[in-house]
Image (tube, helix red, strand yellow):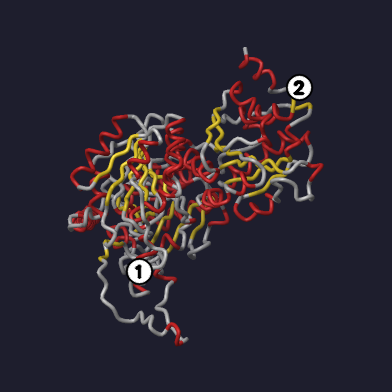
């Protein structure tokens, strides 16, 4: 009966409360859950959610809610919704909303603000939230009158999908009350999801450039994942016998088991990808903004080809040629644009032969890199080499596993070990670079795909920022597995103090409790692992248990990855006599690069 009544609201104006108008707009958008922490500001809306069929996911910290929403959106393809109390509840989300903004993740932040009768009096929990979020969202939409609550919410969803990012929906808390006449529209009546394939002229130029290329290389990115365009990218690659790399921390943008796959570029990525990409005369960048950090030299390899002609496909015009000069820019959907390029290539030369020599070169590069990865992992550690731990985790993951990764020494090293053959399986913190991302995002991924195993790879520093959400996992029955790589330090930054500050460690070391014991106290399964051979069985058992599980993996804190920002660091100098003893020019380090 409720569903019939709801359907009748769409198409005619009906008297309803403002809270009802907001909730019915969410229902029309297909919203199934909202995450946040309850607050008095939106209590009237909250009261309606169960009968509307919308689940409220109560997290332990509002930062977690937007990370959860970020992952849910990436996995499901639907814009997620978060909400919090005006003032501190909303400002607690600033970091995670900023991360989603840089990750191009559609999201709507319902932001109750101070009531209109008290604005400007510095009342309890008053904050100009629009100003706070202006620089970290695609748009801030203010509800200017109670009659506009549904219209402004539709605008928020329209921009979130069109601009691919979070939008703040700011509503004075007193606007949740009152009667209005409203028509609940369906999404197709106020937004368009697809931008098409791009102009015919740009498709033609791209196809001709690729057809005449001597060594074309493809970089497949987030746009391929979001558009489910893997088959179209494969078709182009196979036609050209073009190696395919994936953009930084989007290891699911091309199937790793394909003969033309060479792996990820970017920090701690694949040497096979880098050695291949540097040979390119034409680069086809599909659904990637070619970020500065994601194309920096790595392992001493300056791999991004400065003389190559670049064809860049992106759905957002702002990203075209933003970081690298291009030859052809295509503003379009990654899948549709790829399909059009492939069709045009077939018209140009329908008898193109497979380049078997290139396939052999690719296989050799990949084999060499895989052997190096395993060799580095098998170096002894005390107690466990972090690379060995990553290798043992990845060896036992089922094919359909979703993996979320944080920021830090081990999480970034995982970039070289994680391989996926399906899209929407790799959920990484990306270039905002905040810690505390992986575990709450694992909860969002599990909400989106309850049928898939979800594993979070987290360092102990990041775990300290997110372990409180174990309670959320238990309360909401979200059986995710957290693999906590416990090395007793903020090791990504510690590496900088090793390389540039003569092992002078300030703020780097962490005294950790027993994370497995804490997990058990919180109602989850807790496992402590001190031997490499026990890691795989522990992960397999955790996945089979179908219970929230924390695996506290003890790893060697002296085996460190190269520094994140070597491009931004310099050897220090000291001029004041007070600091002259801090001579950082010559020393012997006991730390090992992994």
Secondary structure at numbered mark 1: loop
Q: Earlier in the sequence, mark 2 or mark 1?
A: 2
Residue at (33% x, 59% y) in the render? 268
Determine the CA span between mark 2 and mark 1. 62 Å
Q: Which mark is residue 14?
A: 2
In the image as oriented, which residue stretches furthest toward the right? 117
Seen in the picture, residue 250 relative to 402 is either above or below; the reply is: below
Check if mark 2's residue and mark 1's residue have beta carbons within 8 Å: no
Secondary structure at numbered mark 2: strand
463 left or right of 16 in image? left
Q: How many marks?
A: 2
**Residue 212, image x and y in percent?**
37, 59
Seen in the picture, residue 276 relative to 43 is either above or below; the reply is: below
At label 1, counting other C-alpha atoms closer than 10 Å, the crowd grade (few under 14, some 14-19, many 20 or more) is some
| Residue bearing the label numbered 1 | 302
Taking depth in this image into account, of 241 and 247 the one nearest to the observer is 247
């Amino acid at each position: 009966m409720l569903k019939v009544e709801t359907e009748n609201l769409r198409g005619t104006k009906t008297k309803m409360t403002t809270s009802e108008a907001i909730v019915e707009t969410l229902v029309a958008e297909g919203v199934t859950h909202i995450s946040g922490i309850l607050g008095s500001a939106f209590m009237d809306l909250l009261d309606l959610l169960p009968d509307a069929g919308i689940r409220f996911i109560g997290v332990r910290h509002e930062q977690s809610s937007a990370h959860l929403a970020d992952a849910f959106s990436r996995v499901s393809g639907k814009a997620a919704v978060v909400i919090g109390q005006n003032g501190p509840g909303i400002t607690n989300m600033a970091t995670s909303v900023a991360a989603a903004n840089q990750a191009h993740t559609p999201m709507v932040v319902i932001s109750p603000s101070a009531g209109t009768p008290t604005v400007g009096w510095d009342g309890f929990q008053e904050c100009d939230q629009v100003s706070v979020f202006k620089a970290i969202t695609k748009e801030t939409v203010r509800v200017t009158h109670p009659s506009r609550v549904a219209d402004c919410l539709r605008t928020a969803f329209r921009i979130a999908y069109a601009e691919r990012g979070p939008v703040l929906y700011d509503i004075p808390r007193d606007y949740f009350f009152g009667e209005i006449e409203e028509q609940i529209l369906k999404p197709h009546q106020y937004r368009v999801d697809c931008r098409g394939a791009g102009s015919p002229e740009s498709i033609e130029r791209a196809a001709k450039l690729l057809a005449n290329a001597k060594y074309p290389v493809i970089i497949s990115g987030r746009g391929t994942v979001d558009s489910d365009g893997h088959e179209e990218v494969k078709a182009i690659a196979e036609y050209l016998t073009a190696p395919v790399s994936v953009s930084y921390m989007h290891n699911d943008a091309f199937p790793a088991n394909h003969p033309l796959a060479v792996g990820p570029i970017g920090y701690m990525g694949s040497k096979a990808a880098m050695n291949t990409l540097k040979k390119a005369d034409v680069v086809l960048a599909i659904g990637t903004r070619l970020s500065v950090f994601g194309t920096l030299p790595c392992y001493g390899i300056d791999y991004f080809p400065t003389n190559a002609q670049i064809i860049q496909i992106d759905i957002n015009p702002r990203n075209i040629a933003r970081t690298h000069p291009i030859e052809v820019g295509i503003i379009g959907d990654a899948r549709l644009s790829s399909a059009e390029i492939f069709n045009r290539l077939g018209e140009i030369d329908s008898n193109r032969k497979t380049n078997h020599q290139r396939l052999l070169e690719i296989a050799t590069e990949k084999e060499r890199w895989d052997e190096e990865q395993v060799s580095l992992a098998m170096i002894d550690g005390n107690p466990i080499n972090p690379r060995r731990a990553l290798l043992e985790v990845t060896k036992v993951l089922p094919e359909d596993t979703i993996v979320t990764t944080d920021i830090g020494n081990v999480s970034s090293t995982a970039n070289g070990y994680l391989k996926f053959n399906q899209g929407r399986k790799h959920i990484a913190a990306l270039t905002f670079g905040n810690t505390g991302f992986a575990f709450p995002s694992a909860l969002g991924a599990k909400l989106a795909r309850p049928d898939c195993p979800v594993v979070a790879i987290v360092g102990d520093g990041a775990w300290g920022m997110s372990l409180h959400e174990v309670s959320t996992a238990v309360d909401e029955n979200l059986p995710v597995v957290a693999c906590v790589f416990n090395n007793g330090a903020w090791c990504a930054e510690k590496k900088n103090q090793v390389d540039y500050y003569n092992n002078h460690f300030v703020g780097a070391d962490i005294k950790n409790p027993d994370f497995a014991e804490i997990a058990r106290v919180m109602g989850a399964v807790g496992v402590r692992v001190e031997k490499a051979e026990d890691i795989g069985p522990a992960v397999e058992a955790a996945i089979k248990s179908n219970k929230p599980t924390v695996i506290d993996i003890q790893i060697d804190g002296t085996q460190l990855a190269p520094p994140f920002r070597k491009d931004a660091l310099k050897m220090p100098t000291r001029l004041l006599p007070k600091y002259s003893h801090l001579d950082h020019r010559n020393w012997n380090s006991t730390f090992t690069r992994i």
